[in-house]
Image (cartoon, helix red, strand yellow):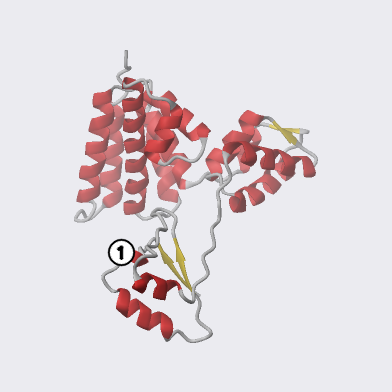
Amino acid sequence: MVEIHDFDLFKSDSKERLCEIFSDLPDFVCVVFIYSTIEYKPDGRQKINKEILKNASVVEFVIQDQNNLVKWIKLHFRDAGKSISTEDAEYLAFITGGLMATLNGEIEKTAAYSEQDTITRKDIDAVVTPVLETIAYKLSDALVSRESIKALVLLDELFQMREAPHKLIYSISLKMRQLLAARVCIENNLSKTQLMEICGIRHDFQARILMNTASKATLSDCRNAVLNCSATALELNSVAEPESRMIELITKLALTSGRYAS
């Protein structure tokens, strides 16, 4: 099985060549195109696109909305003989990325760990492995709060995840751009729902965290953070020690961010 992530088949300059390849695939080969960061949007008006899809099966995996996800988490904990509050269920969904495949194992692990009938946030933090996106959220909050030591500790957690520096700077930059968008929403009296539409955020609690963090930052700080992240992302292509450059970035952001907005 060959997985190809976020390649836009329908905007490719090699559509004819792709048709040739697909028509000559051996029976034992399965090619899967996965769309997670770009939109799957075929253009049925073009004959070539119909050819590409002629032997394909399109399967959509819909991510649950917040209410259904929280109900699902509570139900699974109940099956394990435990209960959990709505707030802590939202928190669990947040730090695991909200994907059921990940949540299923983390729920089992947390239920087995807790000695109480009710799952607490302390139980969750003790055993659940947060996803990269979650640590980046926490990092942005630490930067805005000017907690430089905490920010560096969180950066070290990212390093320990053995992710490539380019992936780390992408995740951090994304959170800074979302933080800027949240601050712009605050400046213009826009709602969490509008922020979710602007940033493509799926869950209400993610938007709430962003809005709370952005309320403590100035618009200028948010803009400068995005610019600094962009400059660092460019420099990572040429520096010999990208980890050191990332530490410099986080230190700079921690020292220059967090002047409370009025």
Q: Nearer the viewer, residue 133 or 182?
A: 182
The residue sitting at 35% across, 72% down in the picture is 47
Task: Judge whether residue 13 can be spotted in this image.
Answer: yes
Q: SS for tag 1?
A: helix
Q: Residue at x 36, y 36 (%)?
A: 178
Please give the name of the residue rendered at 55% of the width and 48% of the height, measured from the top-left corner. Answer: 63
Q: Is residue 204 left or right of residue 73?
A: left
Vertical arrangement, residue 92 with respect to residue 56, above or below: above
- Picture coordinates of residue 220, whole percent (x, y): 23, 25
Identify which amino acid the numbered label 1 is placed on.
Lys
Task: Decide: is 234 above or below 119.
Answer: below
Question: Based on the displayed image, in which of its 4 quarters is residue 144 positioned?
Answer: top left
Classify residue 16 by image quadrant: bottom left
13 left or right of 36?
Answer: left
Local packing at callout 1 (Cα closer than 10 Å; few below 14, some 14-19, many 20+) is: few
Query: Residue 103's spot in the image, x, y percent?
Result: 62, 47
Which residue bears the numbered disc 1?
11
Q: Quadrant of the C terminus?
A: top left
- Establish if 35 lies above or below 99: below
Residue lying furthest top in this view? 262
Q: Is residue 153 visible?
A: no
Residue at 30% of width from left, 41% of height from top? 247
Residue 145: % across, % down: 38, 24
Q: Is residue 159 above or below residue 144?
A: below
Q: Position of residue 91 (x, y in %)?
A: 57, 34
Total number of numbered labels? 1
Work out whether residue 58 or residue 86 is closer to the camera in this orientation and state it: 58
Q: Nearer the viewer, residue 83 or 241?
A: 83
